[in-house]
Image (cartoon, rainbow, N blue to C red):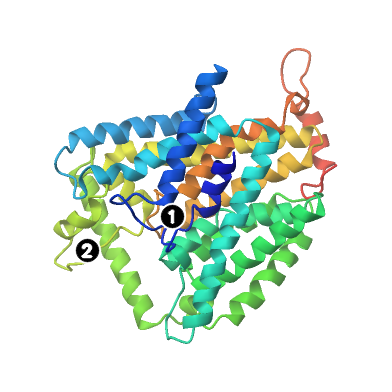
Amino acid sequence: MVFFYWLIAIMPLDQHPFWGREFFGTFTIIKALGVVCFLIALARIATRGVYPDFLKTAQARWYLLLLCWQCSSYFVHWGQLALGAMAYSHVISIATLFIAAVTLVDSRKRLRWTLLVAIGSAGFASLYTVRQQQKYGYLIGFRPGGLLGDANEYALVVGLWMPIAFIWALSNRPIRERLFCFGSLGLMALGVTFAASRGGFIGVILGFLFLIWNSRNRVRNLVLVAALAVPLALFSGSSVLQRFTNPAYGDKLAEQARVITWKAGLRMIAAHPLVGVGLHNFKPTVTRYENGEGIESLAHNTYIEVTAELGIPGGILFVGTLLAPFWTLERNRRRALAAGRTHPANVALGLEAGLLSFAVSAFFVSGWWEKMLWLMIFLTTRLHLVLGRRSRIPRRRNGGASLADARVQQASVAPYRES
């Protein structure tokens, strides 16, 4: 598991001068660790003779269908991909991560450590964003993106882990875990503030509002979030609030470019509704579907870009993969609350809020290939490890669920306090 934790710890550091350094073509240390984890997972399956149930959850089934569609798209667009076979490097790395995560995260302890390492990884990545702001913040319009290279992409990734860091810090957990999560949350909050991503800001806000709405002490938690967010928003010189209320010339150009590429993407979908234009072919072909604007860019909308590249079936499969975890998480959260086990309920709620943050921010950023997203989705398939048999919702003798009993039990438990 050391290699797996190591991989997660450096996963957001794509452009790190050491971890992200390319050797043997585009092969990096991060990719090498991914291969090692994949081989360890295969060795564990072979030696133990126990095969993980890769089809246990809806999100796993949706993902495998998406993977099959992506692979079939390669043969449909044989020789037409702008990046050639390298266009599928993300697909392959995500598939190996799926096998590694489902195989290696096979206990409650390993799931807990994996989540904590992921939270710390997002916090550590934020240190680079804060440092960039410290060095170059005096430049007009500068917005740091850390080692992800783009402020919007950084906010998209970090927004995944901020809600669970917040809820873990307020849970009745060992003090070292709470301090670790609180420190990581503080770094992420600073980083997101300096990045000043409007799409990321909307996603994070809606994620936290979802989390607060599902808490028992809504007013208290709203005050805590406001006390953390408002001073930071006012402190930053490139505040996201200023970009909303008084956008600079560059901000207006970015808005216009997005509208142009979104319209071009919709035309692309209309022209190729079944199979799309091919993976990573959006940017090289987008100018053909514009009205002479000549903007060669990503779609800056994950849903439009995926659908344009893989066709409407591919877009449906991606959305299904993104939404399926909500059903699993909400079901597990209610089971945990009904059994009086609030920490598993907290974990499920934090993951729901993080995925909601990404789902909203993805309307303004292209980022289906982000490994931290897929890590979270794959970890939702392992949440049953922290529930066990004790977390079943009480059943009536005739087999129906006793919803009244479950609601009484849920109402008696505070989501932010573990019994």
Task: From this view, report whether residue 239 is shown above or below residue 112.
Answer: below
Question: Which residue is painted at 14% across and 41% down in the image?
Answer: 79
Q: Of the numbered discs in the image, which one, if any, rests on residue 78? A: none
Callout 2 amino acid: Glu
Question: Which residue is painted at 41% across and 30% down in the image?
Answer: 64
Q: Position of residue 62 (x, y in %)?
A: 44, 32
Please, what secondary structure does the residue beneath circle 1 have? loop
Extreme-front residue of the structure: 24
Q: Is residue 113 left or right of residue 243?
A: right
Near mark 1 (Cα within 10 A), the count class, few <14, some 14-19 or many ≥20, is many
Q: Position of residue 110 (x, y in %)?
A: 65, 37
Question: Which residue is painted at 74% across and 67% down in the image?
Answer: 223
Q: In this figure, which residue is indicated by the disc labeled 1?
A: 362
Q: Is residue 205 visible?
A: no
Q: In this figure, which residue is indicated by the disc labeled 2?
A: 296
Please, what secondary structure does the residue beneath circle 2 have? loop
Q: Nearer the viewer, residue 369 or 207?
A: 369
Q: Is residue 203 visible?
A: yes
Callout 1 amino acid: Ala
Q: Residue 234 is drawn in which quadrant? A: bottom right
Marks 2 and 1, the one that precedes in the sequence:
2
Task: From this view, report whether residue 291 is shown above or below residue 31.
Answer: below
